[in-house]
Image: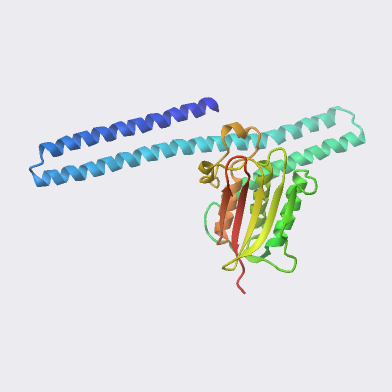
Amino acid sequence: MDRTGGTRRRSVVLVALLGAGLIAVAVALNINFIVVNWRTGLLLLLGVASLVVLVGGLVLNTAFLIREIRNSEQHDAFIHAVTHELKTPLASIKLYLQTLRQRNLSLEKQHEVIDTMLDDSERLQQTIDQILLAGKTGDARRVDNPTDVDVSEVVDECVALVGKRHHLVAGEVQFVDRVQDEAFVVKGDREELMAAVVNLVDNAIKYSGDSVKVAVAVARTSGRRVVVRVQDQGIGITSHELKRVFRRFNRLPAALRSRVRGTGLGLSIVRAVARRHGGRAYAESRGADRGSTFTLELPLKSS
């Protein structure tokens, strides 16, 4: 992957240099044309127009080529991540099945092996579900046949689900600022909203480092909207990364990828679900190692 990444970086530099060189040649030729023919108004006008068109076309072409190279790099990284997420649990399940077949294990050991295989199966199912949901929510169309969904109930279930999935102890992920007597009901798809909240909480846990402390809150805002805020005290997000954190296939810098599993689809799914429900998703952070806050904002059901 490092060799491929280096090749693509060289391709980007080469395309950029080629585009800059062509633009410089075009500008020089047109300036020379204008200087030679400055006394002829029509030729001068044609020279200026051709300069604008030619330079504009070269700029657009160069930008397009660079974007395509970067998109190709992102897609390759996604394929690599998905392959890893699918292959690893499958290999583990196969190994444990071979162990059960070839060895006479105690009943306790058999239960332990089966529990491990169930965990690997759950990880495999999560990856498949993420890919399917990314395809389903890829466009910005509204949800078909929306139903009433209580956001507080969804968040409560998601916090419990993710805590169990990561084998967390009490207090590492907390549902704070819970309003017992108020319902936050939205019109939408319950499964999609659960997937969005699960991705936010799961993302906060994965990027919290060794010490997990995540706070999840639900609150009403002005304009009849409800927000789900997920705050962690983890590695934080730089201002450069903050601008593209919700892009599909976006991953952390290479130095951190080896420590954090994922396909780069989670936060893009959150943004897509928010848009499909007439809301939005955004992130805030004071910088590296200073934690981050992700917010899912949705319109409340009309009375």
- Image quarter (top left, top right, bottom left or bottom right) of the N terminus: top right
Residue 100 drawn above or below residue 149? above
Q: Which residue is rendered at x = 30% and y = 39% of the image? A: 58
In the displayed structure image, the side of residue 69 where residue 54 appears, left or right: left
- Looking at the picture, how far across and down is residue 28, in whole percent? 21, 34
Task: Answer with the quarter of the image where residue 167 lies.
Answer: top right
**Which quadrant does the C terminus fall into?**
bottom right
The answer to whether one can see residue 93 in this image is yes
User: Left or right: 176 with respect to 287?
Assistant: right
Q: In the image, what residue occupies the spot 73% across and 61% down?
A: 178
- Viewer-side residue, 207 vs 109: 207
69 vs 41: above or below: above
Give percent across and percent down for residue 85. 66, 37
Residue 189 picture location, percent across and down? 63, 60
Image-quadrant location for residue 184: bottom right
Q: Is residue 192 visible?
A: no
Q: Residue at x 78, y 49 (%)?
A: 171
Q: Position of residue 146 (x, y in %)?
A: 62, 65
